[in-house]
Image (cartoon, rainbow, N blue to C red):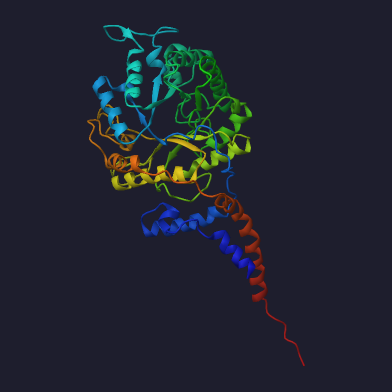
């Protein structure tokens, strides 16, 4: 009897509906999802230390990725930020493109690609001015080295490979931090160094080399502005283990082994839902879903970094049309809108270690990428036509009351579930064997 109760306790779902359990809309997918959830619920659960509230989480969670440096017209940059503000976004994650700022050589910040020549800072100064005018904070993503920073040609390295001398990147980070001291507080150093060719195309990804790059730029930014907040580059959530792509959990473990714990204030994660919604409770290290950040949190807790938060660099669902590549998943526009709202609510209600969640993305500059799947994450078309997800955010986000995080017993129960399941199942198994064993007949 007791073992049966323990088994029920171990397998009792944490929510009240199949949709909330699986993040799936269709009944058949929900039923399959229940089987998946049972499989994951009895596995060892990540250590989350929810009682520790990290620094840098007492901020608005509403952020969005922008590509304002690609907008040639100031009016379009301004309209982009105006519409971001209307949707309740308090942060933009905006790249400060190294190859677009220090273009022609070390210390050369003049743009001579077109006449008339002008300061390469002009465009970025305007972005900072506009963001301030709409009371939006910038997370400045620093990446994309210029060709002069590498001896090998771009054909051999790819355009995103790191510089030969990491001090060159440190110098660039320091120059940006100095120019915008008191105006930009948040800096993210690189993006997805563990894959997607963002560490180059003909060299293996390396947690140790990325840690050296991270620590170099971290130190230089802090020398300029000790109050700056430095974010580690977001790791792409991948299950691959090869030279081109390395599982994010293994990559982070090796980063800590190389000393990265002293070189960032905020860890970054990606929050893509792919094929299931934001409420999906299934949790498995080799399955990519919105709550994947819990496993990164586990690595951080085990390395004594529970007092550091995770900010989600990119969150979203793809509405790519039928017949196109669906590697990023495929949902309807209605689902995209609903999942976005639920993603922000879940981050606030369940994950007290998560700060800003940046939607991927606001808009692209034109329609030349309509044939590419990633275009269909957008909130706005290139001509600023709103998608349903944008309209849902405008209607709902500014008025939402921030929920309270879950109580500690919920996380304790998640941790205890496997230990309730294993002994109770064993007792029931042996009880069943005993019941099935034929009883010896006794004579008079």
Name the quadrant containing residue 346. top left
Q: Is residue 206 above or below residue 23?
A: above
**In this orientation, which residue lies closer to the viewer: 355 or 134?**
134
Looking at the figure, which quarter contains the N terminus? bottom right
Residue 365 visible in image: yes
Task: Indicate left or right for 390 with 306 as reference.
Answer: left
Name the quadrant containing residue 440. bottom right
> Residue 223: x, y in percent?
54, 15
Q: Residue placed farthest to the right in the image?
A: 444
**In this orientation, which residue lies closer to the viewer: 75 or 166?**
75
> Residue 86: x, y in percent?
29, 34
Residue 273 visible in image: no
Q: Is residue 120 above or below residue 33?
A: above
Q: Number of numbered discs present?
A: 0
Q: Is residue 186 above or below residue 32?
A: above
Q: Is residue 136 above or below residue 20?
A: above
> Residue 353: x, y in percent?
52, 39
Looking at the figure, which quarter contains the C terminus? bottom right
> Residue 20: x, y in percent?
42, 54
Q: Residue at x 50, y 32 (%)?
A: 56
Task: Indicate left or right for 391 with 430 as reference.
Answer: left
């Amino acid at each position: 009897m007791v073992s049966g109760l323990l088994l029920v306790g171990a397998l009792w779902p944490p929510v009240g509906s199949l949709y909330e359990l699986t993040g799936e809309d269709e009944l058949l997918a929900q039923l399959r999802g229940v089987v998946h959830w049972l499989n994951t619920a009895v596995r060892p659960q990540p250590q989350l230390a929810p009682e520790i509230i990290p620094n840098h989480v007492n901020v608005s969670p509403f952020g969005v990725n922008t590509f304002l440096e690609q907008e040639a017209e100031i009016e379009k940059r301004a309209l982009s930020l105006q519409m971001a503000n209307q949707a309740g976004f308090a942060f933009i994650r905006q790249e400060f493109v190294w190859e677009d700022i220090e273009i022609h050589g070390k210390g050369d910040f003049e743009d001579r690609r077109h006449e008339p020549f002008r300061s390469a800072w002009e465009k970025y100064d305007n972005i900072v001015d506009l963001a301030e005018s709409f009371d939006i904070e910038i997370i400045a993503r620093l990446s994309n080295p210029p060709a002069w920073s590498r001896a090998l040609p771009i054909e051999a390295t790819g355009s995103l490979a790191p510089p030969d001398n990491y001090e060159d990147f440190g110098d660039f980070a320091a120059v940006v931090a100095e120019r915008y001291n008191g105006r930009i507080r948040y800096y993210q150093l690189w993006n997805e160094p563990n894959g997607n060719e963002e560490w180059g195309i003909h060299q293996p990804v390396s947690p140790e080399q990325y840690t050296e790059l991270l620590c170099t730029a971290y130190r230089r930014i802090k020398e300029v502005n000790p109050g700056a907040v430095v974010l580690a580059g977001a790791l792409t959530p991948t299950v691959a283990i090869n030279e081109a792509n390395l599982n994010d959990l293994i990559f982070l473990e090796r980063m800590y082994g190389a000393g990265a714990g002293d070189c960032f204030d905020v860890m970054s994660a990606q929050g893509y839902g792919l094929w299931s919604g934001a409420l999906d409770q299934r949790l498995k290290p080799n399955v990519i879903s919105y709550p994947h950040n819990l496993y990164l949190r586990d690595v951080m807790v085990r390395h004594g970094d529970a007092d550091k938060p995770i900010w989600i660099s990119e969150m979203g669902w793809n509405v790519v049309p039928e017949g196109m590549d669906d590697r990023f998943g495929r949902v309807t526009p209605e689902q995209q809108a609903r999942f976005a709202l639920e993603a922000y609510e879940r981050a606030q209600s369940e994950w007290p270690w998560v700060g800003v969640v940046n939607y991927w993305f606001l808009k692209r500059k034109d329609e030349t990428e309509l044939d590419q799947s990633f275009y269909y994450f957008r909130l706005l078309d290139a001509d600023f036509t709103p998608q349903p997800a944008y309209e849902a955010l405008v209607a709902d986000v500014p008025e939402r009351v921030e929920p309270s995080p879950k109580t500690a017993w919920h996380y304790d129960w998640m941790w205890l579930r496997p230990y309730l399941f294993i002994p109770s199942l064993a007792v029931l198994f042996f009880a069943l064997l005993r019941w099935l064993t034929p009883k010896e007949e006794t004579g008079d």
